[in-house]
Image (spheres, helix red, strand yellow):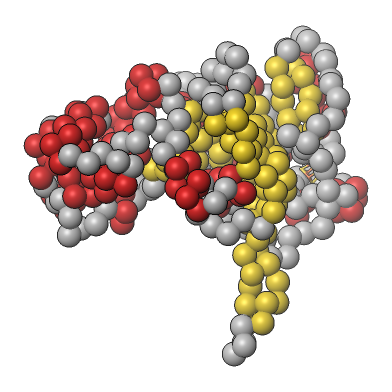
């Protein structure tokens, strides 16, 4: 939980658009708006879950933070021990230094480990780059890292193909930890693993977070996994954040029809308890040509004329003293219902993040 609420990363109006090119001369005929005006604070020490269907922009947002894709606009203000700097404005040397603090764990660690190198070979590279000159010292650090992710030190002499998927993901986590980062973006980090192995890796991530005082941005299409990991959850649809709240609040009182539909698809573990399934019509529309107004309107069971004409802003409400952000024209009405349920009817001012 973010006790002191120190902002580690402030994202302001982030836009990442990819050009759509056609013909012999690769004329730009449009843009995929993968991330479309996203504003978001990430607090030091929290786990912020990022969810949505495939193609909603959550992975691109993660890569945009790390400047791994060309970002079109906006600011990514990172708190370097009290010194706030926009990651987009750093020189390549400064960005390389910043990468010590910001790391990523990918879905498929196999593709990010060089099959021709032993684990020692792969993990020593960043250490070398950041000044650990002695081979013996690198060996010691890598041995410690492997032990930290519950693998044996001597595994450093093995090749990636000698490990199972779960072990490879542990190695991916060890590599992300090697430079003692502050913020780790876990991008579908357990999606490729069996359920039993998923639980082990999730618990390991929680343990490491506590031990190393880490901040996570946890990206997944799986809401149950995100609920297990996160303090707050942001829901993305077609490049925008449509709802953002404390994990429990989002699960108890989802206010956006899209979030409600996603939640309705999660099986309920309790015997005799059923959740009414909301089936969404159609697929996620193309981000090249998003629908007018609220981009969710073609699939929304509550769509009105206003929804087709006007894009709802992401607004901040306060329920039970906790912030809940939602982008829907019906939000105020729904906040009333949620407030009645929680018995503290309070609706606060508008905000953009
Ligand atoms: Fe549905 Fe309208 Fe709300 Fe969009 S703004 S989610 S279309 S009710």
Comparing 73 with 105, the one in front is 73
Report the quarter where the N terminus lies: top right
Q: Judge whether 245 appears above or below 105 on screen.
A: above
Q: Position of residue 165 (x, y in %)?
A: 25, 45
Judge left or right: residue 141 versus residue 112.
left
Quadrant for ligand 1 reads top right
Q: Position of residue 224 (x, y in %)?
A: 48, 32
Residue 63 shows in the view: no
Q: Position of residue 281 (x, y in %)?
A: 67, 53
Could you tell me which residue is drawn at 17 percent across and 34 percent down? Answer: 137
Could you tell me which residue is drawn at 39 percent across and 43 percent down? Answer: 105
Q: Position of residue 192 (x, y in %)?
A: 34, 47
Q: Quadrant of residue 298?
A: bottom right
Could you tell me which residue is drawn at 55 percent across and 31 percent down? Answer: 80
Q: Quadrant of residue 42?
A: top right
Report the quarter where the C terminus lies: top right
Comparing 57 with 84, the one in front is 84
Could you tell me which residue is drawn at 62 percent across and 65 percent down? Answer: 18
Judge left or right: residue 324 versus residue 69.
right
Comparing 192 with 261, the one in front is 192
Judge left or right: residue 299 versus residue 271.
right
Comparing 191 with 273, the one in front is 191
């Amino acid at each position: 939980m973010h006790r002191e609420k120190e902002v580690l990363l402030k994202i302001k109006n982030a836009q990442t658009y990819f050009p759509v090119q056609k013909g012999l001369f690769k004329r730009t005929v449009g843009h995929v708006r993968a991330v479309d005006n996203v504003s978001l604070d990430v607090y030091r020490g929290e786990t912020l879950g990022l969810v949505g269907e495939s193609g909603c922009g959550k992975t691109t947002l993660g890569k945009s933070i790390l400047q791994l894709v060309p970002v079109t606009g906006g600011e990514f203000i990172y708190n370097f021990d009290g010194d706030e700097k926009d990651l987009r404005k750093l020189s390549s040397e400064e960005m390389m230094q910043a990468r010590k603090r910001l790391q990523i764990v990918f879905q498929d660690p196999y593709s990010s480990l060089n099959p021709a190198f032993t684990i020692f070979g792969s993990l020593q590279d960043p250490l070398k780059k950041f000044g650990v000159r002695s081979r013996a010292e690198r060996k010691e650090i890598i041995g410690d890292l492997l032990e930290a992710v519950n693998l044996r030190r001597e595994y450093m002499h093995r090749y990636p193909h000698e490990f199972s998927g779960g072990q490879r993901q542990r190695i991916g986590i060890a590599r992300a930890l090697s430079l003692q980062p502050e913020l780790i973006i876990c991008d579908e980090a357990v999606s490729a693993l069996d359920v039993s192995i998923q639980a082990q890796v999730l618990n390991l991530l929680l343990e490491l977070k506590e031990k190393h005082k880490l901040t996570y941005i946890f990206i997944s299409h799986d809401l149950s996994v995100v609920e297990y990991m996160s303090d707050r959850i942001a829901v993305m649809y077609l490049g925008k954040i449509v709802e953002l709240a404390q994990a429990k609040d989002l699960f108890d009182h989802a206010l956006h029809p899209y979030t409600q539909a996603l939640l309705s698809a999660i099986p309920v573990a309790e015997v005799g308890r059923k959740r009414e399934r909301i089936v969404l019509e159609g697929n996620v529309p193309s981000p090249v040509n998003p629908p007018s107004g609220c981009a969710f309107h073609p699939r929304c069971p509550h769509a009105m004329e206003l929804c087709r004409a006007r894009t709802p802003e992401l607004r901040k409400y306060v329920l039970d003293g906790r912030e809940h952000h939602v982008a829907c024209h019906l939000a105020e009405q729904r906040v009333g219902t949620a407030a009645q349920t929680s018995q503290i009817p309070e609706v606060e001012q508008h905000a953009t993040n």
